[in-house]
Amino acid sequence: MSFTELNISKQLLNALNDLGITSPTPIQSAAFSVIMSGTDSVGIAQTGTGKTFAYLLPSLRQLTYSEQKAPRIIIIVPTRELVVQVSQECEKLCKYQSVRIGGIYGGANINTQRQLLFNGLDILVATPGRLLDMILDKALIVSSLQKLIIDEVDEMLSLGFRPQLTRVLELLPVKRQTILFSATLTEEIESIINSFFKSPKFIEVNRRGSPIDRITQEVYFTPNFYTKVNLLEHLLLNNTQIQKCIVFCKDKLMADEVYKELSPVFNEKIGIIHSNKSQPQRFEAIINFEKGVHRILIATDVISRGLDLAEVTHVFNFDTPQVPEDYIHRIGRTGRADKSGNSITFVNPQEKAALKAIETLMKKKVSILEFPNEVEISDALAKWEKKAKPDKNLKKIPKVEIKTGAFHEKKAKNKKIQLGGKRKQESLRRKREIQRKKRGI
């Protein structure tokens, strides 16, 4: 099927031709008519299959010219990087249309973003936290909203955005079309769908949790962190097929340590991105990686969802993700746009159960590679791998014996109930007498 067979406007067709895109992907073909019908929609497709254009094309097809300031389409994404990327994708498709597009996210000047909203937008792309701030601050009027699109909702939930997302859904007009797109569908997401969607139409072009078939998946069993560093350095230096790669780490601490170990070897060819980096640093790392300045990008899961990075030949999982869906998203950064890709995962003994869970989700075994003889197996342990040992210099605290004393019965005179003196007893007797008379006794 070609785009001309869909009910796409001439302006959109010209924009697609300029981008060199002539045929829709399966999710784009399946979603177009469903979204055009106005019904609530849930799209599930493998990462890298064109989900962004799948919801943008029909949404832009229905968007007419207007001078009103309040946005008619709001797109919620989990990260700042995705706000920028989705905004850029919108601008590419709107090349021949008069559409105002803007993005807002945390960590940027809120007054500048207020002015952006005041000037007027047709399409707003936002992270859930900043979107909620603007609605509560009345800087954003949502009464004219026609479509709400939630992209990579599973990442929002894993980042802890459920309270903000739920509150936003409660504040938006009830009369709207709600669209959700994701690579995976969990029970938590289904709970949100059941609460806020009206008889949604599910658009699913692949089995949930299945990886892209074009990605070769392989595993090395490694004993510890520094052996993983040695193995990664060896592969990067000796495997000529690794032209552009992302190395995923579970947290900022591990990412910083990997970068510290490898940067003396690869110098300006290596970059790093995680949530502790400033927004300009994060954007610079992505730009340098896209331009080829950096051949290697060390990253946390902050870029594992939705971000479209071109020409990534390899993805390394420096650790094995404990959540199987996170693995699917990570490896989806390669094998994009009908190209093949490679995924290599380092698994230590404690991570074998996580690997098994990933294989169960995919219903597919991952190939195990033989550990290279020339790679040194390190005995050193990273600080998080060392078990806490008691300080020998600390003195033991002696056990304190609590003495309860001998037990003996009270004397008879001490068991008497204290009723007060004769005057108090006489006063109580008179009060009882008065109460009896009142009751007629």
Image: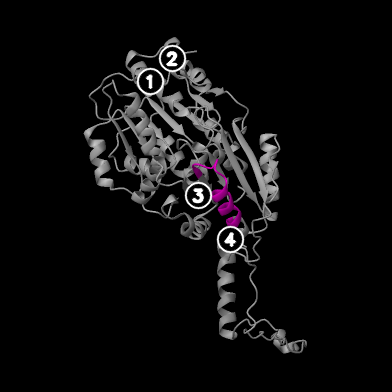
Asked whether 28 falls inside the magenta stretch, the response is no
Dot 3 or dot 4: first in sequence order is: 3
Residue that badge 1 annotates:
16
* Distance between mark 3 and mark 4 Cα atoms: 82 Å
Question: What kind of element bears circle 1?
Answer: helix
CB within 8 Å, label 4 to label 2 = no
Residue that badge 4 annotates:
439
Residue that badge 2 annotates:
3
Q: Amino acid at mark 3?
A: Thr
Q: Quadrant of residue 310?
A: top left
Question: What kind of element bears circle 4?
Answer: helix
Task: Indicate whether 110 appears above or below 56.
Answer: below
* Distance between mark 3 and mark 1 Cα atoms: 33 Å
x 45%, y 33%: residue: 150
Circle on res. 300: 3
Display coloring = one colour
Where residue 341 appears, as percent x and y from the top left, is: 56, 35
Q: Quadrant of residue 397?
A: bottom right
Which one is nearer the viewer's eye here, 173 or 277?
277
Q: Amino acid at mark 1?
A: Leu
Q: Which residues are magenta?
A: 229-245
Dot 3 or dot 1: first in sequence order is: 1
Question: What kind of element bears circle 3?
Answer: loop
* Distance between mark 4 and mark 1 Cα atoms: 97 Å
Q: Residues within 10 Å of mark 1 (few under 14, many from 20)?
A: some
Q: Nearer the viewer, mark 4 or mark 2?
A: 2
Where residue 409 appears, as percent x and y from the top left, is: 77, 86
Residue 189 placement, left or right of 174: right
Residue 343 placement, left or right of 97: right
